[in-house]
Image (cartoon, grey):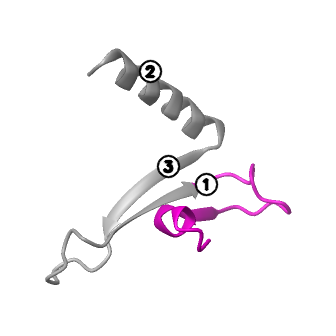
Amino acid sequence: MSDRTDQFMAEFAALCRKYCCVITAEDHYSGYSECGKDVRMTIEFEDDYIADPPVPYEQIDLGRWFDGKE
């Protein structure tokens, strides 16, 4: 990997640790003809850090967020 990639991944990992979150990706309709074209990526917060009032679990659908739908 390049130095820029290494730096990005280190900062990204630190951000995930800071907010107690993980990113997951899944093929939403596996087995159908559009297989691989409907991958959904989400950020899952496993801590009450970001919610107000605090909740034990929160999730962001990245595709909907980038599209401005969430």
Report if the CB atoms under discs 1 and 3 are less than 8 Å apart: no
**Main structural element of the magenta stretch: helix, strand or loop?**
loop
Lower position in the chain sequence, tag 1 or tag 2: 2
Question: Which dot marks residue 22?
Answer: 3
Across and down, in percent, residue 19 comes to 65, 43
Of 52 and 1, nearer the camera is: 1
Residue at x 32%, y 75% (from the top left corner): 28
Q: Quadrant of residue 25?
A: bottom left
Mark 2 or 3: the one toward you: 2
Of 38 and 28, nearer the camera is: 38
Q: The disc labelled 2 sits on which kind of residue?
A: Gln
Mark 1 or 2: the one toward you: 2
> Which SS class for mark 1?
strand
The magenta span reads 45-70
> Which SS class for mark 3?
strand
> Which SS class for mark 2?
helix
Q: CA distance from mark 1 to mark 3?
A: 7 Å
Q: The disc labelled 3 sits on which kind of residue?
A: Val
Q: Quadrant of residue 4?
A: top left
Question: Which dot marks residue 7?
Answer: 2
Of 63 and 29, nearer the camera is: 63
Across and down, in percent, residue 41 comes to 42, 61
Q: Which residue is mark 1?
A: 45
Lower position in the chain sequence, tag 2 or tag 3: 2
Residue 50 horizontal side relative to residue 61, left or right: right
